[in-house]
Amino acid sequence: MASAVGAPLVGGAGTGDTGTADTGRAGRTLPVAGFVLAAAVALAVSLRLPAGTAVVGLAVFGILHNVLELRYVTGRFEGVLHGPFLRLLGALITGIVVCRLLPPSSGTRTAEILLAYVLLAAACVHALRTRPVPLAASCALLAGAAMASLAFPAYHFVVLAHLHNVVPLLFLWEWSRAMPRGRAAFRAVQCGWVLVVPALLLSGALDGLLGAGSGWTDRLALSYTPPAWQHTHAGLRFVAVFAFLQTMHYVVWVWFMPRYAPDATAAFERRAPVLRGVRAWALGLGGAAALSVLFVSDYTRGRSLYAAVASYHAYLEFPVLLMLVLGLGERGRAAGADLTGTRPTGTRPTGTSATEERPPEKSPPAMGATEGSATDARATDGRKESSDAAR
């Protein structure tokens, strides 16, 4: 099954391709068929065993998808995520990690919320520093959102948990921009599993297929259900939504991006050669094995440790997405490709126009020029032969 659904569209990493070249009808349908199949399986297991799917999926794929997502984001958007800006983001996220490692309290939750909005504000300043009016509007919007999050912190973290699983839609949308054909079908499938299926689950349309709740379901519902709907049947629906979206989240980062975005992998490996090839997979799988052992011995401690470590990949994606929305992510990605000399096919160097990039056209020879040149050459040869004969 893996070979039938997961074959890459183009050559391997390091070729400079975007992973979206046209390879015929069969090649274009592979990602779509893979997502449809994965969504069907994920929905089936999430309906029958929502809590088990969420817990087991986190233990098996949690650390691995952290590593692979960081590899994709830092490789794909290397033109944005570098230098002092990347160090600033890293420092802010490290502050969030410290908050999550400390004993939970209202103080640590407030500090995490504030650091999260400072992170977004830093991205706005970096992206809009030369455009004061949009920058002021963005900062005002962030200030209003921060006030709402501080007033309702429980809702903030529930929204954050589900939002993280929805984020791949924007990365997939950006990735599909380079698809020469099949883009509409690909995007429709992504919207289907990200938006339509969760809406059906929350509406109760699939309640007849939902498995019975358990103590684990009630435990998870406290983290993934808005407070107003906790301790109701809606809690089971929210856990099923989380389990489904989390499973598809892993499909994106563990299956799709490694196979269909080799340019991002190649860019990351140039930046971090120590994690070249299978080493990144080994790191992720080793971390998953250690986390699984910790989950078995002490689930609460393992969940807290994972939440802290996962902060890096979960929070780093938000500034990148914000700059994509502001129109800077693609420019930054192209700039990074220019620096390394692996600009993807079909893109222009940063700062050049289509006219500047087009090679100069050679003027066609005048009509009869070739024939005239041949006649002149024959005449010259004839004069040379006559001169030799006279001598």
Image (cartoon, rainbow, N blue to C red):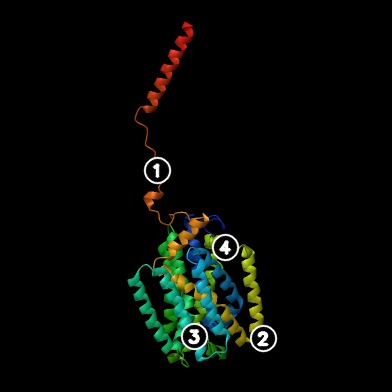
The image quarter containing residue 129 is: bottom left
What's the residue at 59%, 75% (across, down)? 63
Element on which disc 1 rests = loop
For the residues labelled 1 and 2, the Cα–Cα distance comes to 68 Å
Element on which disc 3 rests = helix
Q: Is residue 331 above or below residue 94?
A: above
Q: 10 Å neighbourhood of mark 3: few (<14), some, or many (≥20)?
A: some
Instruction: Name the residue beneath numbered marker 3.
Output: 111
- Identity of the amino acid at label 3? Ala
- Identity of the amino acid at label 1? Pro
Quadrant where the N terminus is found in the figure: bottom right
For the residues labelled 2 and 4, the Cα–Cα distance comes to 37 Å
Determine whether label 2 and label 4 are within 8 Å by CB. Answer: no
Q: Position of residue 112 (x, y in %)?
A: 49, 83
Instruction: Name the residue beneath numbered marker 4.
Output: 271
For the residues labelled 1 and 4, the Cα–Cα distance comes to 35 Å
Task: Give the number of the mark in front: 2 or 3.
Answer: 3
For the residues labelled 4 and 3, the Cα–Cα distance comes to 32 Å
- Identity of the amino acid at label 2? Ser
Which residue is at the front of the view, 365 or 178?
365
- Identify the mark nearer the N-term, 2 or 3: 3
Task: Give the number of the mark in front: 2 or 4.
Answer: 4
Instruction: Name the residue beneath numbered marker 2.
Output: 297
Instruction: Name the residue beneath numbered marker 1.
Output: 360
Q: Position of residue 253 (x, y in %)?
A: 54, 70
Q: 10 Å neighbourhood of mark 4: few (<14), some, or many (≥20)?
A: some
Q: Residue furthest bottom?
A: 231
